């Protein structure tokens, strides 16, 4: 799924206004829902993840900015989903966004999915793991070149695997 709203949805939002379009767009997101290859019951996720990981990955929470050790991680390697080990971001695409969260300008091919999120009352693009559906963070259009994207991720939703 695209990182941005399709042109028809953007025009619809502009014409009708984001608040009035919410029920329609929320229904579109439900229609886009899919079953992920890695799927566990809620009890299994609680057993497999730490409390912080569960809160972020399964309940769409967020960590306090600046608290993740991954903000300062600068070695060569790969950032992977803490829930299923799915490789998400190459460390070469990480940059300091000065937000307090690990930020990247591009995910690995096929690693993440996106969907529209209204959790804070206005539309944002949520980023989730393509294998387990775990919430990772959000993507914004204020990142560096070459993509112009800022994948603002929760460090507790990921693990780092250093290159060997």
Image: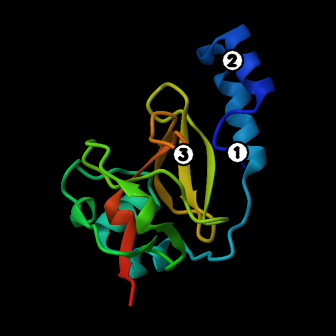
Relative height, residue 42 to residue 148 (above, below): below
Task: Left or right? Give the position of 47 relative to 38.
Answer: left
**Quadrant of the rendered image containing residue 9:** top right
Pointer 3: what residue?
146
Q: Residue furthest bottom?
A: 164
**What residue lies at 47% left-to-right and 68% top-to-bottom?**
90
**Sequence order check, earlier mark of 1 and 2:** 1
Residue 89 locus on image (x, y percent): 49, 65
Query: In the picture, residue 56 is in which quadrant?
Result: bottom left
Q: Which residue is mark 2?
A: 13
Q: Residues within 10 Å of mark 2 (few under 14, many from 20)?
A: some
Q: Residues within 10 Å of mark 1 (few under 14, many from 20)?
A: few
Image coordinates of residue 125 in percent, x first then y, are: 56, 40
Q: Residue furthest top?
A: 15
Query: Alpha carbon of mark 1 to alpha carbon of mark 2: how far?
Result: 17 Å
**Which residue: 27% across, 65% down?**
70
Front disc: 1 or 2: 1
Circles 1 and 2 in contact, beta carbons < 8 Å: no
Evaluate if marks 2 and 3 touch, with contact meaning CB atoms under 8 Å apart: no
Judge depth for marks 2 and 3 and give the one in front: 3
Residue at the location (23% across, 61% down)? 68
Mark 1 lies on residue: 2
Q: Residue at x 76, y 48 (%)?
A: 32
Q: Which mark is residue 125?
A: none
| In the image, residue 16 above or below residue 146 | above
Left or right: where 65 falls relative to 31: left
Q: Is residue 15 above or below residue 22?
A: above
- Residue 133 lies in what quarter of the image? bottom right
Counting other residues with Cα less than 10 Å from the Cα at mark 3, is it few (<14), some (14-19), or many (20 or more)?
Answer: few
**In terms of depth relative to the viewer, which is nearer, 25 or 70?**
70
């Amino acid at each position: 799924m695209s990182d941005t709203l399709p042109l028809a949805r953007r025009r619809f939002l502009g014409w009708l206004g984001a608040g009035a379009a919410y029920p329609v767009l929320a229904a579109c997101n439900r229609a886009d829902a899919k079953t992920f290859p890695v799927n566990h019951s809620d009890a299994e996720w609680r057993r497999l993840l730490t409390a912080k990981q569960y809160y972020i990955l399964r309940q769409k929470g967020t960590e306090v900015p600046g608290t993740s050790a991954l903000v300062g991680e600068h070695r060569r390697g790969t950032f992977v989903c803490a829930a299923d080990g799915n490789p998400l971001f190459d460390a070469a695409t990480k940059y300091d966004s000065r937000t307090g969260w690990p930020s990247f300008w591009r995910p690995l091919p096929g690693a993440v999915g996106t969907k529209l999120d209204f959790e804070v009352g206005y539309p944002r693009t949520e980023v989730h793991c393509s294998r387990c559906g775990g919430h990772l963070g959000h993507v914004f259009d204020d990142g560096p070149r070459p993509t112009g994207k800022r994948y603002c991720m929760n460090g507790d939703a990921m693990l780092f695997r250093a290159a060997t």
